[in-house]
Each structure stands twice: as structure tokens, then as C-alpha cells.
Image (spheres, rainbow, N blue to C red):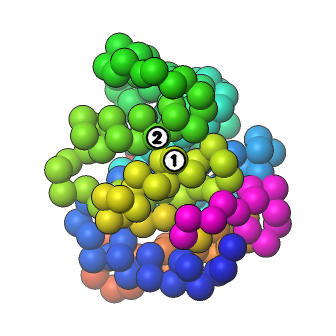
Amino acid sequence: MNPNAFANLPGRLRNEPIVRLFLSYETLTAGGKTLSAARFNLLRQVARLPGVLPALIGSPPAAELRKRLPLDGALYAGQDGAEIHEPEETPDRLARHLRLADATAPALRRALTGWVLANRSPADAYPVYLGCGALDQPAMELVRQLNGYTPGGSSPCDPQAPEDRAALFALLYAVTNAAALPGLPTKPQAA
């Protein structure tokens, strides 16, 4: 992945009043490995930025995602989007809201992304999907079709490759530094 692919995202996050930020668990964790404390704290800082609405999508069940990456105010989509757990809501299933002919992981992630944007996001939310690999490509294509942001264009990156994960976390670092400019408050922390 080209690290320059991320260059315009920090400014975009500063200029968009509301961002629906989809995060691929497998990309962030290289397939389920534990994040370092520094990387987890960076992820938490991004999730706390004003106007950022995080949604974590992954293969483990939603409760497991929430346990592994507890982010304030995040929507958790476990089992590749089949299972949904929103803040302060009862866990739900995507199948209650959509009839899906294709229940493969990539199709579920795409369907979940579209459903969240249509039903659980403000109409003016700017979609961003940070993922890579084959599981995320259909959802990332949907976000690109909606004029949202995805890293790396249409070619998949390798979530196991250290350079691709380093580029992603360099992006998150740039986002938090750009957001720390004077006059840009952070979201209040949960008590």
C-alpha cells in the first residue's frame, strides 16, 4: 500500500462535520493479534474525535470485538456484519433488516456498510472505510461509489504485511495530530 494514499484524510476529517468511520478488525489487528497499547490508544483517540462515529466490523462475534477493542460510542458488527451491537442498544441481527441472497463474509460486510449508512448514520455523514484484504473490498467499493474515502484505491493490501499495517497506523497518527490543532476539541471521555 502506498502511504501517500492517506495524505488527504486528516484534512478531510477536519473539514467534514460528521464521519462514519468503518474499521476492519482484521486489518487493525493483523487477523486477530492483540494491538500494542500505543496503537490501541491511538485508535481510541481517533474514535473520540468530534463528529467521528466509529463502526468496528470483524469476523468474531460482536461481544468478542467489544471485549478486544473497547471503543466509546462504537457500533460493533460481529460475524462480518451479521450481528450488530450499537451503543446502549440490545444486540441485533442484520437479517432482521435485510434479506440477503449472498451471506459470504465480503457480501455481509458490504450489506452492513450500506445498512449502517442508510439507517444508523446522519444523512450528511462522510463515509470512511479503513480496511484491506479480500473481506473488505466490496464494502470499500461501496464507500468509493458514495464518494467516501478508502485507502489504497481498488487494489487490496495485505493485513498481515507489517508495512501495510504501519501505513494504516501512520494514518491514524496523522489524523490525531491534525485534529489536535488549536480550536479542534476532542470528544469528552466516558466516565
Residue 156 magenta-drawn?
A: yes
Residue occupying image coordinates x 59% and y 71%: 152
Disc sitting over residue 72 in the figure: none
Q: Residue furthest left?
A: 123
Main structural element of the magenta stretch: helix, strand or loop?
loop
In percent of width and height, residue 173 lies at 58, 74
Task: Please indicate, yes or no, whether residue 91 appears anywhere in the rendered image.
Answer: no
Question: Neighbour class for label 1 at 10 Å: few (<14), some, many (≥20)?
Answer: some
Task: Please indicate, yes or no, whether residue 61 appears anywhere in the rendered image.
Answer: yes
Q: Kindly identify which residue carries mark 2.
A: 110
Q: Kindly identify which residue carries mark 1.
A: 138
**Where is 20 relative to 112, above or below?**
below
In percent of width and height, residue 98 lies at 34, 21
Magenta residue span: 153-164
Amino acid, disc 2 = Arg
Residue 81 magenta-drawn?
A: no
Q: Are marks 2 and 1 in contact (CB under 8 Å)?
A: yes
In percent of width and height, residue 142 lies at 40, 51
Residue occupying image coordinates x 35% and y 59%: 145
| Direction from residue 186 to residue 160 in the image, left or right | right
Q: Earlier in the sequence, mark 2 or mark 1?
A: 2
- Considering the numbered disc 2 on the image, is that residue within a helix, a strand or a loop? helix
